[in-house]
Image: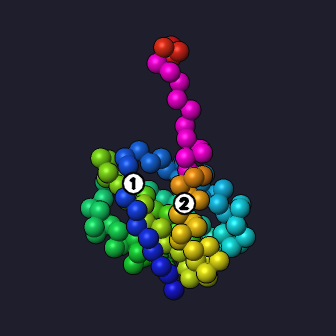
Amino acid sequence: MYESMTVQVRAGLGEWRLAEAVHVLSDRHEILHNATAAVRRVAKPDLTNATAAVIAEAPEHGASFQAVWLDADDEGRLVLVARHEVLAALPWHVLLPELVAVWKAHAPIRIPAQIRA
């Protein structure tokens, strides 16, 4: 059995940053370390229909924890789907803030305009 959480996110979330954040969390937490985690991006979706589809298709993907970024260019959603046993050990109120903190910690390095060639 799965549960889901959908969070509105800004454009340019960054698939590699999201994948890295999920990887760091799975290193930190035994339940995620032993679980299959999946990260993917869906480009230019109909947000309402795509959100429902991600949740409905979660069992088909088989991952214990899934992070799906619905990238609609100017806005987006992050759909998190987890099995009950994952949430029993790592509830949403712990998982989501940690995911955000790790994602922020892996922000891309920005080079000031005057230094660029």
User: At which x and y percent is residue 48?
Assistant: 28, 67
**Residue at the location (65% across, 77% down)?**
89
Tell me the tag on residue 43: none
What amino acid does circle 2 point to? Answer: Pro
**Residue at the location (62% across, 73% down)?**
90
Comparing marks 2 and 1, which lies closer to the viewer? 2
Please say if 57 is above or below 105. below
Residue lying at the far bottom of the rendered structure: 1
User: At which x and y percent is residue 83?
Assistant: 55, 79
Compute the Cα span from label 2 to label 1.
Answer: 14 Å
Q: Is residue 63 visible?
A: no
Q: Is residue 39 visible?
A: yes
The answer to whether 53 appears left or right of 60 in the picture is left
The answer to whether 117 appears left or right of 30 in the picture is left
Query: In the rendered image, which quarter is residue 77 located in?
Result: bottom left
Mark 1 Cα within 10 Å, few/some/many (few <14, many 20+)? some
Mark 2 Cα within 10 Å, few/some/many (few <14, many 20+)? few
User: At which x and y percent is residue 114?
Assistant: 48, 14
Asked whether 110 falls inside the magenta stretch, the response is: yes
Looking at the rendered structure, the secondary structure element under dot 1 is: strand
What amino acid does circle 1 point to? Answer: Val
Tell me the tag on residue 97: 2
The kind of secondary structure the magenta stretch mainly shows is loop
Tell me the tag on residue 9: 1
**Residue at the location (30% across, 59% down)?**
45
Asked whether 116 falls inside the magenta stretch, the response is: no
Figure coloring: rainbow
Q: Earlier in the sequence, mark 2 or mark 1?
A: 1
The residue segment tinted magenta is 103-113
User: At which x and y percent is residue 106?
Assistant: 59, 44
**Residue at the location (41% across, 75% down)?**
55
